[in-house]
Image: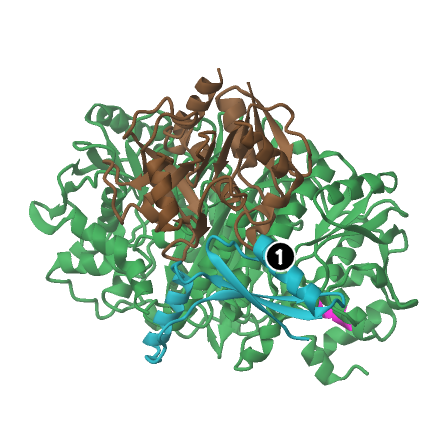
Chain colours: A green, B cyan, C brown
Amino acid sequence: MIDKKLLKEHNLTEEEYHLIVELIGKEPNLTELGIFSLMWSEHCSYKSSKIHLKKLPVEGKDVIQGPGENAGIIDIGEGLAVVFKIESHNHPSFIEPYQGAATGVGGILRDIFTMGARPIAIMDSLRFGPLDKPKNRAIMDGVVAGIAGYGNSIGVPTVGGEVYFNDCYSLNPLVNVFCLGIAEKDKIFYAKAEGAGNPVLYVGSKTGRDGIHGATMASAEFGEDLEEKRPNVQVGDPFKEKLLLEACLEVMDQNLIVGIQDMGAAGLTCSTSEMASNSGSGIEINLDLVPQREEGMTPYEIMLSESQERMLIVAKKEKVADVQKVFAKWDLDAVIIGRVTDNGRLIVNAGGKTVVDIPVDPVVNLCPAYRRPSAVPAYLEPQSQLDPAPSIPEDFNKAMEKLLSSPTISDKEWVFRQYDHMVQTNTALLPGADASLLRIKNTNRALAVALDGNSLYAYLDPKAGGKIAVAEACRNLSCVGASPIGVTNCLNFGNPEKPEIMWQFQNVIEGITEACQAFNIPVTGGNVSFYNDTEGVSIHPTPVLGVVGRLDDVDKTTSPSFKQEGDILCLLGQNKNELGASEYLKYVHKQKRGLVPQIDLSTEKKVQELCIAAISQGLLSSAHDVSEGGLAVCLAECSFLSEQKIGFTVDLQDNIRVDALLFGESQSRICVSVRAENFEPLRKLAEEHALSLAVLGKTGGDRLVIHHKGKELLNIPVLHGYNIWKQNIPDAFRMN
Amino acid sequence: MKVRVLVSFKDSVLDPQGQAVKNALHTLGYGGVIDIRQGKVFEIELEDISVEEANRIIPEISDKVLANPIIEKFEYQIIE
Amino acid sequence: MKFGVVIFPGSNCDYDTYFVLKDVFDQETTFLWHKEHSLHDVDCVVLPGGFSYGDYLRSGAIAKFSPLMQEVKEFADKGGLVLGICNGFQVLLELELLPGAMTRNKNLKFLCQHVHLRTENTHTPFTNRARKGDVIKIPIAHFDGNYFVEPETLHTIKQNDQIIFRYSEPNGHLSERANVNGSMHNIAGLINTGGNVLGMMPHPERASEAILGSKDGRIIFESIIHWLR
């Protein structure tokens, strides 16, 4: 019988249970309860977030598919569409870093090719605890290897991303995986189960007991009983998925199927009920026909299994043999396990008996939405003050060296070179640039992608943090000459049942909404990951924004590296007296506090437009956005990334605290280098955009030199700084 | 019948995985570990055949498929 | 002149290689499916990179048993041109068309980066447009590229001038630092004694267009085209 304990195990409240009974007109049996527990979990139902998510702008003239499907779709012209999404795999990656991250990649890839798109790029946003702790190194090592292991094998390049480090991720790392694919506009597929009598086919790996209750796991806090949760981990099989990818794209290309849905989190339960619900139809399946890897599985286990690399397909009745032929070509089975009905019910049979008979609408659509209480967090007021103000360092060279050894700022080649970032031969900019750039073969165009999200900003000012995440991702695109066309977001938060977490969430959404409206870009989907708490400690609110941009002439781009000596260095935007929430305060002064940098979205937009215009006119040798570590680190990175390690000398004139000038993180700034003959045209262009252009100095020499009104602040050899920046992360891993 | 085949690097081939495990164990204080060689284990279930027959086909499939004789050696035991 | 690019289940550089031959070099090119028994009269077979059969047993170990590979072996025995790139090189080693074997990279990590290669022998169908000592910049992307061979065999392949590419510094200097995967004798590319089968770990198809950061890989395709013409 269904009692309180059973409900608790299924993460359902008594009120929810009573609602279920009312909606389906009977007491559910155990399998039916399992189905509701999955579909009404936070992970699948978005019950705590959907009221707030509704605020996000989703409209746009090029939007083909907004939120609600496996991925968002935007028209990019020439008969092509870009299909993209970001998703979290935080909890599984903490339990088993390699497989957790690997199956995260596998899942997001399926989301993309399920829609008829060939995945062409993966990016990741990763968050770990400090690397001096062996446990954090082990997690990072496993996560990076897992992403590589899956992506490299299946042949989709991992072209970039970002990695941040903060104490709050020590017991709760974040693994957010973004994937982008390209589809022909007239060959897009959806999760539809249309046409009563059409057969339902099961394709891909056999079903085992993997990950039972993975989706509900992602909807609960971790306590100390972690070890017990271990058997939930799914193991990825990238080879099987590669075959599945090719076979699925082939049946779609031949127009043999009606609809398709991947069986990721919530497996057979989610795919059957969602496909039926989306089409207002029903589905009847026989579990005896489902290919099984283990013996003696119960209907409950088969329905709830999260075995990877599986798909559910509704085929055209007369095309079944053709579908099976394609799958056979790729050495895969395609088994008919049921059919589409028109009664609006999910009916599951096993061993000659009906084990599930419920209406699909309540399962998919009628989970209650909660407006959970929210309250301003107590930490906010004291921590947003910078009182007393930190002392100004006596030796800026030392402060700079220290900052370059912050793993958030240090070079990430250790990560990127484990990823095959070049397969498919579209990667026009190597990882480490402001944004990734992918040419589209047989056209002159390219797509750019940037991921961004500074959780310290979001912690100290959630609304500003949300705004800045959007603005900075767009700024990254502008640094390679691309204009934003669409957004996907992954919102990582603590337990939403805590009012202060809910307050953070609401405010982050408001910030994202405001910024997306300012840039006039639609949000086409994404993912919310709540319950990122371990042993009662919540992570900083971490919105990760994935912004896709368009570049109409792939040759009109630039990169952050200095190209030659003697170029003039200019700043688009303004230095301000802002120190709060900076990496400098966090890493050098050990203070996570202060006011988050102000952002004026109209200025931000103007700066970006100027940068894009200058790049398209071929005026810029390099462009790099000023972010963590401030102006000094920005300039140094341009040196480090240049092949000849070209130094620079600049003289700054602003009347502000010198450490804020060097390391502050004021927004809306891009540092560019220009050939002497391009300076005047750039100055005129800036004028047309009603922006001032500050001349900072020149590239050249073999030192990083910064003066303030003629007085030397910073002077270190490029190679010295480079070695600190380059070796920091590899050295951390050499410590064992 | 159940047979277990163990494939490992020949002694003349460097085994970097084994070395890495050894180094890790040394760091953890197990200084007594002198050497580690890493390998792969295959558990093969065969339809009932004679031991002689098994002694004929197991080396054959090990040599042909399971191991690369240029760098690897194998040994096996009949466990059931 | 016709090129054939083999597709095994798990190949993932098949389209890249096809694109370079077909669209960049404008050559007649066809895919060859692993289950087939015919090479469709191609003049040069390319085994592309990837993870054939998932590479779960050993890189390239299962692919060698496919029906098509028996045809490729026969083709090679008769002097047909075969180029194996990355996983294709691993398959050629497993098939014993080339001597030696691959083990895991010395740092035990997958490595994707540009490397420099010094051209050692230009009297081959694959390098005849290059000059001896030329250094080219081409990317690698592999986990198992640490070339191993018994000392006696190494001696023989040196004597036969079978080493075609070696990992080097940009100036051509051979060093341990440049030998990123730990290969014996810095070997990156190797030819058979017949001079018609080349295996190489680096990916020339990823370095054949300016937009990808290097055009140095073109020399290999240009040489083959020149040879066959």
Main secondary structure found in the magenta portion:
helix
> Quadrant of residue C130 in the image?
top left
Q: Badge 1: how crowded within 10 Å, few (<14), some, or many (20+)?
A: few
Q: Is residue A325 above or below residue A588?
A: above
Give left or right: position of A516 versus A230.
left
The answer to whether residue A56 is magenta is: no
Does residue C157 appear anywhere in the picture? yes
* Residue on which the image places disc 1: B60
Q: Which residues are magenta?
A: A32-38
Q: Is residue C70 above or below residue A28?
A: above
Q: The disc labelled 1 sits on which kind of residue?
A: Glu
Residue C160 spot, x, y in % from top left: 36, 35
Q: Quadrant of the N terminus of chain A?
A: bottom right
> Quadrant of residue A186 in the image?
top right
Name the outermost residue toward the front: B52
Does residue A432 appear anywhere in the picture? no
Depth check, front residue: B52 or B42: B52
x 79%, y 38%: residue = A256
Residue A616 spot, x, y in % from top left: 38, 27
The answer to whether residue A36 is magenta is: yes
Residue A473 spot, x, y in % from top left: 42, 46
At mark 1, the secondary structure is helix
Depth check, front residue: A110 or A380: A110
Report the chain holding disc 1: B
> Quadrant of residue A166 in the image?
bottom left
x 29%, y 53%: residue = A665
Residue C208 spot, x, y in % from top left: 42, 28
Q: Is residue A257 above or below residue A661?
A: above
x 45%, y 50%: residue = C102
Q: Quadrant of the C terminus of chain A?
A: bottom left
